[in-house]
Each structure stands twice: as structure tokens, then as C-alpha cells.
Amino acid sequence: MTTDQTEQAGQAAYLDATRLAYDTAAGAYAEIVPPFFGRDPFGLAMFRAFADVVRDGESAGRVADLGCGPGHVTAHLRDLGLDAFGLDLSPKMVAEARRTYPGLRFEEGTMTGLDLPDDSLSGIVSWYSTVHTPPEVLPAIFGEFHRVLAPGGHVLVGYKIGDRLRHLDHAYGHDLSLDVYWRSPEEVEERLAAAGLTVRARLVREPDDFERATQGRQGTLLAQKTNSTAP
């Protein structure tokens, strides 16, 4: 097996495991997670900043919520005045999103190979949707972000801060198998920069009372496509 074949096999294995885990837990996740999004004033402030720079940009247009889950983030982007649609790896998550928000568009797909034209989006949100991504796959994902963003477009990335890998055998009331990666702000920024995405704003948030036991600090980065071609 060649190096490329080995990388493709590893990528397929992680995608299959993530898809199965979220298909298994989709209903419970849709009940548990969205309320926490609405109780994060700091994260919501970054969303408002993202919406402002996207609306004011030269290429104002569609925004993709990549790894949209049950659709609550896509709906929030719509409420902020953006032309947003959602994409998720899990068919059952997409079904939950369509059921809850029938007026919005949701599709199945992967961040490693977006079925979108070059330079077609004014914004991307990746709200904790790369936390299951192995480090060697991140360049491909951020490269896809750069490809589909119009020049001057923005991306908002939420992630867990740290330096560890945690394997979950049980979550959201279900037995499953899922890897979760904590990353440093420096690592995420370097990965974005390597893909031609320049960080414009940073947020590091301390855990709230609910998160303190298991989650740790949370990070958000707002980056912009400043070069028409990736480095």
C-alpha cells in the first residue's frame, strides 16, 4: 500500500467512525447540546463579529455551517441575517436538522471533500466540527475551506484547548467509539495560516461550572482568506 493509499484509508476510517457515532447519538445530541450554545455569551459575541464582517465584505453571499449537527448553529446564522446552509457527515443529524428547521437547507457531506465550487462562499463556520479530526487530516480540511471561500471570505472555528486525545466509549447516553482532540491555539493558527487563512481575532474562554470537570478551556478563531491561492 502506498503512502497516499494509507492516508486515504486512515481518513476513511475516521470518517466512518465519526459518522456512526453521531448517527447513533443524533436524537440525544439534538436534545442535549443546542441549549448550551445559547448560554455561551462569549461564543455568541464571536458569531456576531463573524456576521458583521461577512455582511460587510466585498463577497457577501452564502455561508456554510460545516458539521452542522442538528442545525441550531445554522439557524442562529440565519437569525443574524446570513444566507446560511448546513452540511454534516451524519445522515441522522441531517434528518434531525431538517425536521427541526424545515425552512433551512441541510445536506450530507464531508469537510475533506466539499461538493462546492471554488470561491463560492463568503463565510464558513466550523463550530467544534474538527475536534474528531486527526492532526494529519486537518491540512486537507483547512485547504478545502480556503478553496471554497471567495477572496476576502471569513471562517469561524471553535475548538477545545489543550494537548491531548480522549477516546469516548460512551456519550450522550449511548455506547459509541469516538476520538476527541484538544489543540493549542498556536497549532490551530499555524494550520490555518498554512492553508492561506489569516487569523483576525482570537477568543480563549475559561470553562463554566458545567464544563470544568471534563472540558477545560475553549477557543474560537476568526480567520480570513487573504490570498487567492493557498501557499
Image (cartoon, rainbow, N blue to C red):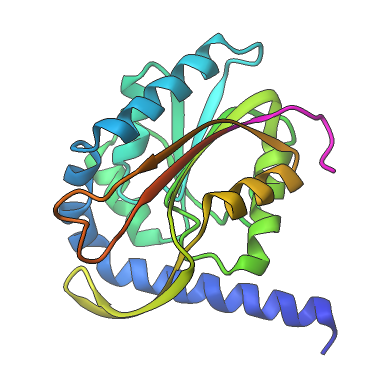
Q: Which of 164 and 226 is in front in this view?
A: 164
Considering only vertical position in the picture, is 77 above or below 215? above
Q: In which quarter of the image is the N terminus?
A: bottom right
Majority secondary structure of the magenta segment? loop
Quick check: can you spot residue 103? Answer: no
At a point 27% along the width and 62% down the height, the residue shown is 26
Q: Give the range drawn in magenta.
A: 223-231
The percent coordinates of residue 122 (x first, y second) are 60, 24
- Relative side of 144 to 122, left or right: right
- Relative side of 91 to 38, left or right: right
The percent coordinates of residue 178 (x first, y second) are 39, 75
- Relative side of 182 to 2, left or right: left
Q: Which of 217 and 74 is in front in this view?
A: 217
At a point 45% along the width and 29% down the height, the residue shown is 84
Q: Nearer the viewer, residue 104 or 141?
A: 141
The percent coordinates of residue 196 (x first, y second) are 75, 39
Q: Nearer the viewer, residue 30 or 156?
A: 156
The reply to whether the magenta stretch includes residue 228 is yes
The percent coordinates of residue 64 (x first, y second) are 51, 36
How many numbered callouts?
Answer: 0
Quick check: can you spot residue 160? Answer: yes
Considering every residue shown, the one lying at the far bottom of the view is: 1
Q: Quadrant of the C terminus?
A: top right
The reply to whether the magenta stretch includes residue 229 is yes
At a point 67% along the width and 80% down the height, the residue shown is 9
At a point 46% along the width and 76% down the height, the residue shown is 17
